[in-house]
Image (spheres, grey):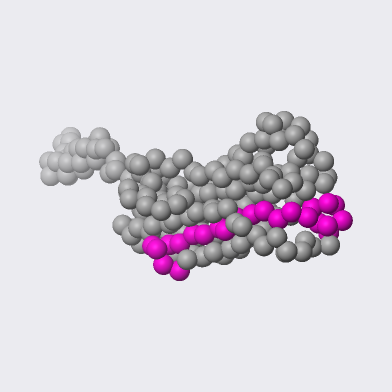
Amino acid sequence: MRTRRRPPVALGLAALAIGLLAAGCGQDAPPATPPLDAGPPARWRRAVDTGGEGLSVVVEAMRPCRVTIAWRIEAAIEGRRSVDLSPGDAARISAAAIPLKTPPALPPPEADRTKGRTRAAGFLLRYSVDEEGDQSRRDIVWTRDKEPWTRVAAAEVPPTWLDLPTKAEVPVLAVGLSDMPDPSGLRLDLSSPPRIFSPRPPSPDDVMHVASLFLEVEPR
């Protein structure tokens, strides 16, 4: 009886297919493409030429982003301004808090007068973006003391680039004012938001006033 034999061409094609399959399985996977939104949207550093009063920083965009600058006066947000930046764009932000001389005849509000707060103190708060559109605000606080405890704190921004967090208030400058009878141990913390730290709990009538400038970065 004769035995049928498969054509040798079929065996060759099958072997070729198996070889190609094995070779494909041994190849490394192509490198993953990083997402377009990877990394921080912006970074900042201290400005080289910091002429004048206060603090001056430079914010540079790494990705398309929006930088918002505003004053936080206690719980209120004022003087808000937003700047859209593209990768490689930079904006210079300058801020200052200048002690304010208030008129002696300025009458206090009724709520402050009933608590004995008849002396005015405060600061002129200023900031600008790219030295244009100066935003100013008079921050006046009524206290019981002629010379209350006051502090000004500025962010410790390095001269080299530092990544900025996303969608978080980053304090740039803050002022604190208090008329606690014993101000020893008081400290102005540049936290988010800034606050006056006291080793003793203040009374309801003690002034613990804080105003600050912050910036916030978000992708767009």
Query: Can residue 47 be seen from the camera position used here?
Result: yes
Q: Could you say which is closer to the camera, residue 215 or residue 26? A: 215
- Say which residue appears at 64% left-offset and 54% top-offset: 122
Q: Give 125 or 168, whichever is nearer the viewer.
A: 125
Please, is residue 138 above or below residue 7 in the view? below
Q: Report the side of 136 relative to 10 (left or right).
A: right
Q: Residue at x 68, y 45 (%)?
A: 147
Query: Residue lying furthest right in this view?
Result: 114
- From the top left corner, tell me how far across and down residue 16 is, in percent: 17, 41
The quarter of the picture where the C terminus appears is bottom left
Specify the farthest residue to the bottom. 133
Question: Residue 64 appears in which quarter of the rendering?
Answer: bottom left
What is the count of numbered marks?
A: 0
Which image quadrant: the N terminus? Answer: top left
Q: Position of residue 78 (x, y in %)?
A: 61, 63
Which residue range is magenta in the image?
111-133
| Residue at x 34%, y 41% (from the top left corner) | 160
Residue 113 lies within the magenta run: yes
Does 207 sit left or right of 153 as displayed? right
Q: Is residue 84 visible?
A: no
